[in-house]
Amino acid sequence: MTRAAEDEVVDLLGDLTDWLLGSSFEGTMRCEAVVRDIAARYGHSVEVTFLADSAIVTVGGRTRSYAREPGVPPLHQVSEFKRLVADIHRRPVPPAEASRRLAAIRAMPPRWSKPWQVAGLVCFTVGFGISVQATSQQVAVSALTGLLVGLLVVAGGTHRRVVLVSPFLASLVVTGIVLTLAEHGFIEGGPIQLIVPALFYFIPGDAISAAALELATNRMTAGAARLVYSVVVLLVLAFGALVAAVLLRAPASDLFDTTVPGNLGPLLVWGGWVLFAIGVMLTFSMAPRDFPWALGLVLLTAGVTELGTRAFGDPAGTFFGAIAMTLAALLLGRRPGLPPAYVLYLGAFYVLTPGSHGLRGLESWIGGDEVGGVTGVADMVGLLIAIAVGMVVAAASLSRDEVRSSARADDAGRSSTRREEAA
């Protein structure tokens, strides 16, 4: 492609940067690489720096800055964005046309209607709940609390103020319900394991994992910002549980983390991960054609993590799971016609996330179990390190192959362009 007009490239890169900021839980390095690749494709060099919620882009003598709250983008938009990037690299796509297509992608409505989104959060909660406590009471309580959280999230999703307070409200309501059931003898064991699954949607597992990865690769500012944000969210969720206990005048010790032996068979436990993957699809607007691949990665990550944990303990299992997840997502995500890596590993990130350990530790600590609380928080830190090192090892092992793959893709794109021009 010949060198494009600077004005059009600046506009395209600005729109691109703004959109990537909203999905920067994939990591700042990846966002910067995308912007540089697109600029180079249009014959321009760019200086770009991403932080957790801001970015600066310089093309020629023009500098623009952007600020946006990061979050989880609708996954069907991420898949369409991969097709747009592939088209830009494969054939001449004028910058103005690319900008129009990007705007159309950002304007795409959710893939699933609101009732399906509520159902997705129920599946999300029940599926993860089975992995926390494989009991019939967990299924029943998670279905009820997941429904309430789903209604809160979906109904308040368009109201900024509701979105801001929804983690606290959800923690308050869910904890109140579970403590009430415990006080009346309807459940066995500690309530925390019944509380956490319904709040799992609010636990910033992707932010925690991205923070660990960025800190491990010396992206200190972005990594520290995400880590602080994640800890604040966990504290808000834990504070909601404390307020619920105070309002109900329940003993603080009710928040102790007490394990109950599972009564569900292995088949139902693995079925829980399938249900969880369905919840990810419906909750985060994944396209149905991408679901089989995302489900496969969830099961692969869960399986490798389970085997590693049984053989070597929790941190080692998480480390091996992170390697398997990253390798599979990167290898599959760069192939044409398959979902992008972010779509593939979002659900798997939740499988690995240490956030649930941190929340359980904080709630136990608030309940007066200092030893259990410190242990839970320490487990979270250990798993953070395991995830970060595992992802770095996997990415480093593929870096050379990815360069070769990109070169082959560029050669194929140039050959295709020459054929089109000759025709």
Image (spheres, rainbow, N blue to C red):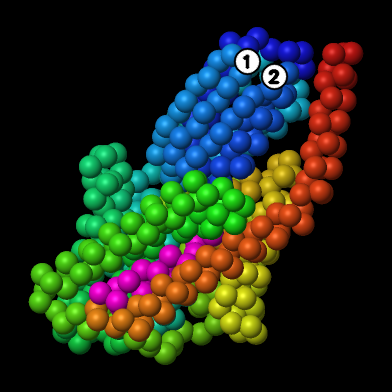
Question: Compared with residue 81, is residue 258 higher up or lower down, i.e. above or below?
Answer: below
Q: Main secondary structure of the magenta part?
A: helix
Q: Secondary structure at mark 2?
A: loop
Residue sitting at x 26%, y 52%: 166
User: Which amino acid type is shown beneath numbered disc 1?
Assistant: Gly
Name the residue beneath numbered marker 2.
44
Q: Is residue 212 at least partly visible in the picture? A: yes
Question: Compared with residue 357, is residue 368 higher up or lower down, i.e. above or below?
Answer: below
Residue sitting at x 72%, y 24%: 41
How many residues crowd mark 2 within 10 Å: few (<14), some (14–19), many (20+)?
Answer: some
**Side of 61 where 37 appears, left or right:** right
Q: Which residues are magenta?
A: 349-366
Question: Compared with residue 215, is residue 156 higher up or lower down, i.e. above or below?
Answer: above
User: Which amino acid type is shown beneath numbered disc 2?
Assistant: His
Residue 360, quarter of the rendered image? bottom left
Q: State the residue in front, 344 or 54.
A: 54
Please give the label number shown on residue 382. Answer: none
Q: Position of residue 127 (x, y in %)?
A: 45, 68
Q: Position of residue 280 (x, y in %)?
A: 48, 56
**Side of 18 where 300 appears, left or right:** right
Q: Secondary structure at mark 1?
A: loop
How many residues crowd mark 1 within 10 Å: few (<14), some (14–19), many (20+)?
Answer: few
Residue sitting at x 59%, y 30%: 48
Q: How many marks?
A: 2
Q: Nearer the viewer, mark 2 or mark 1?
A: 1
Q: Position of residue 180 (x, y in %)?
A: 17, 77
Q: Are marks 2 and 1 in contact (CB under 8 Å)?
A: yes
**Side of 178 where 35 appears, left or right:** right
**Side of 261 where 148 appears, left or right:** left
Name the residue beneath numbered marker 1.
60
Residue 118, quarter of the rendered image? bottom left
Screen quadrant of the C terminus? top right
